[in-house]
Every structure is written in C-alpha cells, then in structure tokens.
C-alpha cells in the first residue's frame, strides 16, 4: 500500500478526483449514477449551483434564507454577504483555489455565510466542532494544513493554542491567517472588513470533481479521519435523500441542533434547505430541549433535525405546548429506538423520519418517508444508492440474516492519506461498519455497530435492541448497552442506565429493569449487569460513546 503514516508529516491535499486517486490510501469506492439527476456536468460549484442560481434563475431572491432572533436575510441579501466575505478571503487573505480554510464557531448566520464564501471562492472548507480543545484542533490542523482560519472570537483561545503547538511541527513556511468574527465594533472583525468589499464576486468555476470540503470524523475510536467531498458529491447528495424522502419545499422553515461542522447538520441545516429555497433558523444560544420546542412554536418551524436522545427529552415539552406548524421530524446520528419514535408521535402527532448516513458518504442513504415507516426498520435504500447485507467475504446473506451493511452510490468514502481507507472500501463498496438485516420487502433493520454486536453464549444480541426495551420502562431516562467479557459466556449484556429523578437506583430497581427486558425480549438478551449513572458519555453531536463504556465496563 502506498503512502505514509499521516501522523508523521502534514498531508498534501489533492485538488480533484483524479489527484485523489493517487492520494487515497487503499481503494476508491465505486461511483454509480443511476439517473440523470446524479449526472453533474464537468464544471460545477456547489455554492454557485445553490445560492447564485437561487437568486438568478430559480426565483428565490426575495425568499428568506437565514433567520435568527436578531435578523433575517433573503437569498439575495445572503448572496451579497457571501460575495463580500469571499472578497476578503481572496483580496486580503490571499486565498487561492484548493487552499484549506478552517472554520470554528457554533451554528449561526455568520458561520453559514463564511462556509459558503470559502467554497464559492474555490477554497476547501474544514469545519470544526465548537467544543474541540487545542489538542484535537492541532490534529485537524496537522492533517488539513489550512492557510486561513475563520473563528468566532469566543472560541479563539483554543485555536491559538493549537496553532502555537502546530508551529512546532515541521510545516515549512506554512502560516495560518486567523480571521475573527463576532467581535463587535472591531475594525478587523470579518463583518467590518466585508462591509468595505464589493458585493460582486465571480464564483470559482472549477471542476465538479474539485474537493469542496474536508469532513472530520468525531474521533470516537481514535485519531480523526478526514473525509474528502467534492462539489459533485454535495450536489448529488442534494438530489438524493432530501428530494426523494424529505421532500421539503420553499415554504419550509427548518430548525435543528446538529452542528454545521457535522455532515448531518451541514446538509440538513444549510445545503438541503438551499436546494429548494427554504429557510433555516439559527439560535443565539445552544438549544435546550425546552428552548428548542418553544422556538419551533414561536417561529412556526415545519422541519426539525436532532438526535434521538434530544427528541426524547423534548417530548414532554412538546406535548405541553403543542406544535401545530411542525410537519416533519428527522432523526439521525445514532439508532432511533422505537420507544422514542412512539413517544414523539404521541407528543406531536408527527411520525419521525429515521435515516442512516455517514460522514464518509456525506449524508443519509437508507431512510423512508413517514407514510412508509415500518416498525423497527430504518427504511429502504434511498433512490440513487444500492445497499446489501453481506458476510465477511462480501457475499450477500439471505434476507432476515444479520450481516454487514455495504453501500454504493453517487457518493463514497475518500479519506485523505489514511490507511483506514482499505477498511472502509472493499471491491468498490462502502462498509460503514454497521450490522443490519434486510427483510423480504427491502426494509433495513439496524442491529448495532459491527463492533458493538454482543455475542453471549453463542447468541447475537444487538445493544440498541436492549436499549429500546429499557427505554420503554417509565423509570429510564437514558441508557447504553455493551458486551462485557465473561469467562463463562464469552460476553454478558451490561447496561448503563440514567434514571429519571423520581426513581431510586437500588437493587430493587435493577431487578425490576431486568424483569422488564425479559418480558419484552428473549431471555438471553436481558442485561445481567446494570450500572446506574448520572450521565452517559456522548460526542458533541449526541452520539453515545459506547467505546468509553466498554473501557469502563
């Protein structure tokens, strides 16, 4: 295998797909374009296609695009501001096509406009989670080698520490120009600098196969990986799940909690709404379950995105105030327990849209609209993709049999200089690392992450199935289930449980929960150990970090 350990030196970023072929360690995925909507022309820029065309040809110029509690911007106003920021980046910071730009900030209009400006100018956007610390940022800087960083002033300290640390690494003459925003009345604030610039900017007209962004994985299992996505990838994604499953319109108002630095958030809370002329609301403060419910009601939001745990926490507030405007609720990022789906439907009358996607594939590739939901299933493969359940040799297994999920379509995994590419792509197929079964009607049922499957006394047990059963008990607020090594059974099922405030975590409660699971599932699936916790470890995007539970188990 060609290449070197990415931890030893900065990564040389390939400009486009032809260069990626020589820079990706391992195998490239097979790309399939099953209909005309995925056949993107040779020259394309995702921002030109979504923002410029929205104003120039699609008639969305006067539609509201970005909303907050302080200001609303139409598509035309947003385009003007994106152009001004792009002029700052090119004319004052020296941005050249292919340069990487690190973006650091929470979900906001300023962050969204900056991301769009970087990509419109031909740069490569490298968005980072707001809660990352200096050590984690340094790993991203070493991998992505950005020349410019756009940073919310409130998050600058960790970035400065990361840049100082990275300067100790052999980087040649590399220098990072830090551009600050949200520094009121400061002449060097990005907003103030942009106001002095022209409102005209010609979209960089590169190839559709130019890299538009680097999406870093959450790093829950080791050193973060950088997934490269081209303009073609992002345009194809806009024509896949949102068009065939979500079916949003220009009248929709979208709200959600996933960070824009997370592909789930970038698609759902920016690119996908733009593709149909809809608008997105960004809060001035991070959501709590109660504040998100109240905001949905106050602004008349019609579509919401968040993780299953957040929906569960929102449900009692939603039931109390009612949400007449809400039409669609999207869940992704982790498995959706049927108990949470039922709870949300009872509170709002809205059938949740579940989906599974991947940072490496950019967005959702298995999902079904509310009218086609089947209990316990995530859904069917999204038009444009092909999915199957296979054994360890890549052979498709009989329907109803648990195996590994394999996917191909118009997007696919392209890690930057990472030997783990060979683990993700095999014979052209993408392996997201999930265990599934598929029924005779083509519905896919999530079982667990492939490395989370519990094998106890010869039986396969999916942790999410046990979690779903536990969540159906009124005492359980949150839970996580893992396999704990055991001399007699190989593994036992162990549950970590957070109880609701009114319940005591004693021996009686442990026995009660075990009996509850036994009454719902096959007896071998019940948790032989239950450990009560005040909280469970989660990523910034809300994913349960089972690897931490396994390490502590």
Image: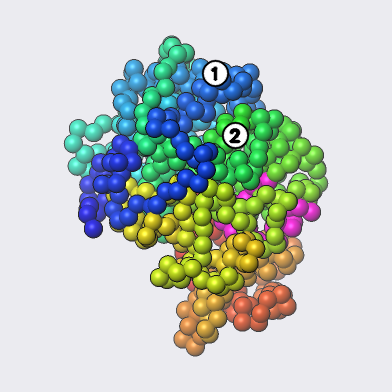
Give the image quarter of residue 172.
top left
Residue 552 appears left or right of 291? left
Give the image quarter of residue 524.
bottom right
Residue drawn at point x = 62 percent, y = 50 percent: 331
Cα–Cα gap, marks 2 and 1? 17 Å
Give the image quarter of residue 55.
top right
Residue 107 visible from this viewpoint = no
State how many labels appear: 2
Residue 515 visible from this viewpoint = yes
Q: Quadrant of the image for the N terminus?
A: bottom left
Name the residue nearer the viewer: 434 or 523: 434
- Tell me where residue 418 appears, x and y as whole percent: 31, 53
Q: How crowded is mark 1: few (under 14 residues within 10 Å), some or many (20 or more)?
A: few
Residue 62 appears left or right of 50? right
**What range is drawn magenta here?**
329-346
Q: Is mark 2 on a helix, strand or loop?
A: helix
Say if the magenta span includes residue 337. yes
- Tell me where residue 176 appears, x and y as whole percent: 30, 31
Q: What element carries label 1?
A: helix
Q: How crowded is mark 2: few (under 14 residues within 10 Å), some or many (20 or more)?
A: many
Residue 401 appears left or right of 513? left
Residue drawn at point x = 38 percent, y = 43 percent: 228
Instruction: Identify the mark at residue 56; answer none if there is no mark.
Output: 1
Q: Which of pointers 2 and 1 lies earlier in the amino acid sequence?
A: 1
Considering only vertical position in the picture, is 550 above or below 147? below
Instruction: Identify the mark at residue 273; answer none if there is no mark.
Output: 2
């Amino acid at each position: 295998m060609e290449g070197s350990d990415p931890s030893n030196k900065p990564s040389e970023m390939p400009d486009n797909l032809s260069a990626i072929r020589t820079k990706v360690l391992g195998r490239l995925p097979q790309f399939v374009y099953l209909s005309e909507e995925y056949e993107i022309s040779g020259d394309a820029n995702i921002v030109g296609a979504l923002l410029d065309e929205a104003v120039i040809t699609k008639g969305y110029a006067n539609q509201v695009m970005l909303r907050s509690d302080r200001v609303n911007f139409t598509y035309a106003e947003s385009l003007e501001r994106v152009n001004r920021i792009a002029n700052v980046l090119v004319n004052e910071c020296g941005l050249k096509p292919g340069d990487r730009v690190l973006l650091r900030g929470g979900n906001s209009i300023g962050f969204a406009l900056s991301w769009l400006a970087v990509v419109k100018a031909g740069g490569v956007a490298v968005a980072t989670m707001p809660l990352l610390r200096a050590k984690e940022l340094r790993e991203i800087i070493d991998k992505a080698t950005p020349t410019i960083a756009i940073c919310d002033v409130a998050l600058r300290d960790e970035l400065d520490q990361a840049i100082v640390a990275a300067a100790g690494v052999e980087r040649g003459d590399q220098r990072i120009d830090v551009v600050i925003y949200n520094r009121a009345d400061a002449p060097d604030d990005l907003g103030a600098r942009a106001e002095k610039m022209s409102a005209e900017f010609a979209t960089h007209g590169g190839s559709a196969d130019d890299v538009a962004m680097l999406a870093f994985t959450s790093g829950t299992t080791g050193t973060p990986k950088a997934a490269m996505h081209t303009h073609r990838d992002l345009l194809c994604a806009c024509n896949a799940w949102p068009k065939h499953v979500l079916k949003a319109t220009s009248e929709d108002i979208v709200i959600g909690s996933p960070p824009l630095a997370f592909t789930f958030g970038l698609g759902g809370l920016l690119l996908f709404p733009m593709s149909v002329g809809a608008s997105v609301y960004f809060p001035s403060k991070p959501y709590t379950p109660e504040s998100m419910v109240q905001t949905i009601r106050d602004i008349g939001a019609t579509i919401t995105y968040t993780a299953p745990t957040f929906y569960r926490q929102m449900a009692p507030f939603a039931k109390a105030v009612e949400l007449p405007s809400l039409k669609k609720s999207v869940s992704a990022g982790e498995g959706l327990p049927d108990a949470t789906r039922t709870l949300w439907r009872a509170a709002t009358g809205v059938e949740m849209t579940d989906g599974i996607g991947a940072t490496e594939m950019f967005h959702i590739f298995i999902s079904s609209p509310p009218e086609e939901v089947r209990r316990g299933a995530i859904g069917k493969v999204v038009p444009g993709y092909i999915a199957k359940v296979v054994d360890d040799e890549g052979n498709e297994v009989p329907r109803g049999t648990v195996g590994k999920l394999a996917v191909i379509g118009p997007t696919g995994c392209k890690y930057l200089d990472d030997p783990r590419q060979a683990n993700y792509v095999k014979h052209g197929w993408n392996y997201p690392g999930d265990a599934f079964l598929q029924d005779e009607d083509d519905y896919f049922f999530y079982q667990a992450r492939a490395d989370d499957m519990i094998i106890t006394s010869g039986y396969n047990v999916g942790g999410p199935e046990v979690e779903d059963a536990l969540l159906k008990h009124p005492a359980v607020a949150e839970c996580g289930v893992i396999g704990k090594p055991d001399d007699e059974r190989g593994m036992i099922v162990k549950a970590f449980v957070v109880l609701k405030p009114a319940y005591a975590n004693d021996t009686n409660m442990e026995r009660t929960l075990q009996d509850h699971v036994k009454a719902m599932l096959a007896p071998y699936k019940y948790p032989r150990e239950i450990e009560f916790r005040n909280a469970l470890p989660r990523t910034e995007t809300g994913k349960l970090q089972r690897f931490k539970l396994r390490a502590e188990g």
